[in-house]
Amino acid sequence: MLTLHTAGHLVAGAGSEPVPDGAVLVEGDRIARVGPYGDLAASHPHARVRRWPGVLTPGLLVRGADGLLERTYYPDDPYETAELGTGPITGEAALAALGMTEARWGHSARRGTQKLLARGVTALTGRFTIPAVRTAVVRSGLVVLAPAGPADGAGASLDPFAGREEAGQAFHGVLEPGAPARFAVFAVTDPGALLAEGATTCVATVIGGRLLHRRR
């Protein structure tokens, strides 16, 4: 089945010029074509169309995600937030006080991966040593890449744009025919606003051609 994803601007990769009213045509788990929406819609009139507000980009990459998923606890809303608050919990003493078990780490990791998907993340690196966390990551659909080195991802953030000089530094891959269908859409007025407004503006995340996050 063909699906045509379109947004106000499309950025195919780091350093690429934005395409106004750009679109990505997806067939299965791959990108079939990339270009102006009008051209792709005319040549594929029977494709299902998904219109998104904002800017469509390659999916984002988070390095050192083991720190975000194995050394950070995400309270379960609403069951734990009254006692623990809504923010992530870090630090050896704070985590020890929670009496973390493997099952609890797995539940937290599932919530953590949902937060990553909700920020346009499609790929991550990390050395995951807790089996329940590894399972949660695999089931999330996120692509796991090998760490670049011992210091890979030092100071990792849920927002891949944090600390970047250019938004393209957070992109993973390029949107081009034949490439895996992994991309995200952010509800910002133009590509220049991505860094300022951050990844929490994400309205959709697609991995393998599947819509894994959609803001409601």
Image (cartoon, rainbow, N blue to C red):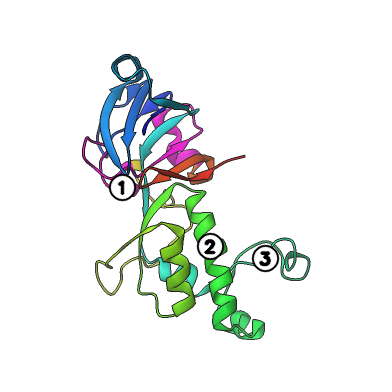
Q: Earlier in the sequence, mark 2 or mark 1?
A: 2
Give the percent coordinates (x, y) of residue 120: 45, 46
Instruction: Judge depth for marks 1 and 3 and give the one in front.
Output: 3
Give the Cα distance between marks 3 and 2.
10 Å
Quarter of the picture containing the C terminus is top right
Name the residue: 64% across, 62% down: 87
| Span colored in magenta | 168-197
What residue is shown with label 2?
A: 112
Q: Give the secondary structure at mark 1.
A: helix
Disc 2 residue type (three-letter): Gly
Q: Earlier in the sequence, mark 3 or mark 2?
A: 3
Q: Quadrant of residue 84?
A: bottom right
Q: Earlier in the sequence, mark 1 or mark 3?
A: 3
What residue is shown with label 3?
A: 76
Disc 1 residue type (three-letter): Gln
Name the residue: 45% across, 63% down: 139
Q: Give the secondary structure at mark 2.
A: helix
Q: Which mark is residue 169?
A: 1
